[in-house]
DNA sequence: GTGGTCTAGACCACA
DNA sequence: GTGGTCTAGACCACA
């Protein structure tokens, strides 16, 4: 499993980790029950502090993406919706607004943003993936 | 010029200001050469710390949206994109991919994501030709 | 606002803090919008590390009990159910099972446990409190 | 004697073992003087580390549920409560109050909490006189 | 002043 | 070996 950290990024390190794992799970590159690297191992690989990895994993646990097993490690959790419809929408809007805000800064028009989203959706979630 | 601050918002105040000015410029409600309120005036109107307004303006200057004229104030700058086309696209994709991953974690389908993006775009970037 | 830490407790310090604040909110001793002590202040009062207080507050934020405002502090959030019915039940069962497991260790019978729960419910949530 | 381990459980394995033995004793399925399986045997049966069983037994000895007889094994001890009546009640209240606070945070009513406790008690402590 | 992130490192619980 | 908690302390972002 490959995780990369961008040194100069405005995004915090722990957030970069959790986002990448979220993506691996979302795109089925990590399946339910799969182990993720141990806190210490990933910290060593990325040359960062174990606490930072632990923070990323803790975030994923509270969002129901991972679960920890005492003394064994972290594993991809069974996908279950733990949030209410309105909370899910609130979180979706938060994520979309952030992307739109960045797109505006980059001078893209609404049409360009929508079109590009279509492309990314097809790339991240190829239709075959949806048939399952 | 109307700027609104949402008190309880998770977004920082300075970011709310800079985003709103970006939108006013993007939608031509503020044209090249137009003045924006002085730092002190806007701070007074919004009942916030002048430092916060100064920070927003500084960011807009850095991104080429505004320019300051010593002793006169801040004005809308001629548009110039600081990034190359491919660099802009790369950054856009990065922002969209992050939003999509979170949306998938939240169990939304591609169609739901696209639809919701439309809604947010209309909310954040209302059509220019709208009768106000 | 009084928070107390039991030194020899098997419960972690951050958990003691979050539980006590949860209780203050649950019993309306802290109302929506009220500020809680700043991370640094509470850490100083309790003679513990600020990170430990921050961890407790972060837990309460993700459970929707508190919200943080950039540079201002933490405040009691408007009560909103962010979890699905089944997730709420799962969490309730988890809390009840822990209590029952401790009660069993203490040699109480099921009847004694139920009776005592009634008493505590009346103590923590006097009927007048429910009429509102 | 039947002990079951739930692999994905948030509860530690040693705690699952000690809780189940406590219940067997509490419900007289194990009587004073009865032997429990040897550490090695139970570890083999459950396919877990013997250290884990040893830890569970050690806790039960410490709490006066079991006693070890050198070279013979572990046996159910005569019941003796190590805590005074008021100390037991204080600890029970503490456990219940914590559960209640969390339940209130989750927006459950007192009635819902009591009802659910009944269900959990029946699940965790099935009536002794049940036909198995 | 406020909170947020990160490091270095200790010590404990569990398998 | 695994994760969990806590400290001490630095440095940054924001009001």
Image: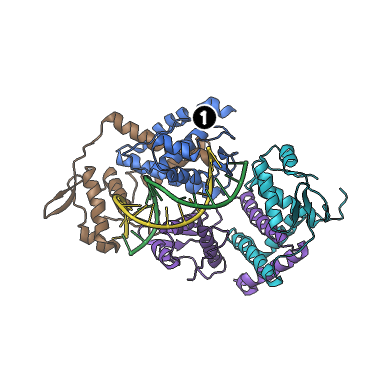
Chain colours: A purple, B cyan, C blue, D brown, E yellow, F green
Let me know if residue D69 appears in the view: yes
Residue C120 to residue A126: above or below: above
Specify the quadrant that holds the N terminus of chain D: bottom left
The quarter of the displayed image where residue A98 is located = bottom right
Residue closer to the observer: D52 or B20: B20
The percent position of residue C130, horizontal first and vertical second, equals 56, 29
Q: Which residue appears at 75% of the width and 40% of the height?
A: B41
Q: Which residue appears at 70% of the width and 61% of the height?
A: A103
Let me know if residue A125 appears in the view: no
The quarter of the displayed image where residue B111 is located = bottom right
Residue A3 to residue A87: above or below: below
The percent position of residue A116, horizontal first and vertical second, equals 71, 68
The percent position of residue A68, horizontal first and vertical second, equals 42, 58
The percent position of residue D40, horizontal first and vertical second, equals 21, 61
Q: Which residue appears at 43% of the width and 44% of the height?
A: C52
Residue closer to the observer: B45 or C31: B45
Tally of numbered discs: 1
Q: Is residue B3 left or right of residue D27?
A: right
Report the residue marked by disc 1.
C29
Residue closer to the observer: C54 or C102: C54
Q: In this view, does D54 lie to the left or right of A31?
A: left
Within 10 Å of disc 1 (Cα), the crowding (few <14, some 14-19, many 20+) is: few
Q: In this view, does D36 lie to the left or right of C124?
A: left
The quarter of the displayed image where residue C68 is located = top right
Q: What chain does badge 1 belong to? A: C
- Residue sitting farthest toward the bottom: A128
- Residue sitting farthest toward the top: C128
């Amino acid at each position: 499993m490959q995780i990369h950290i961008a040194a100069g990024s405005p995004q915090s390190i722990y957030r970069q980790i959790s986002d990448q794992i979220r993506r691996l799970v979302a795109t089925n590159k990590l399946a339910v029950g799969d182990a993720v690297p141990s806190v210490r191992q990933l910290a060593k690989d990325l040359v960062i502090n174990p606490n930072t990895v632990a923070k990323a994993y803790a975030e994923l646990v509270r969002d129901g993406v991972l679960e920890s097993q005492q003394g064994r490690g972290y594993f991809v959790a069974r996908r279950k919706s733990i949030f209410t419809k309105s909370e899910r929408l609130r979180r979706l809007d938060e994520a979309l607004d952030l992307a739109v805000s960045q797109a505006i800064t980059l001078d893209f028009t609404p049409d360009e943003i929508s079109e590009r989203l279509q492309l990314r959706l097809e790339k991240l979630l190829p239709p075959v993936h949806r048939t399952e």
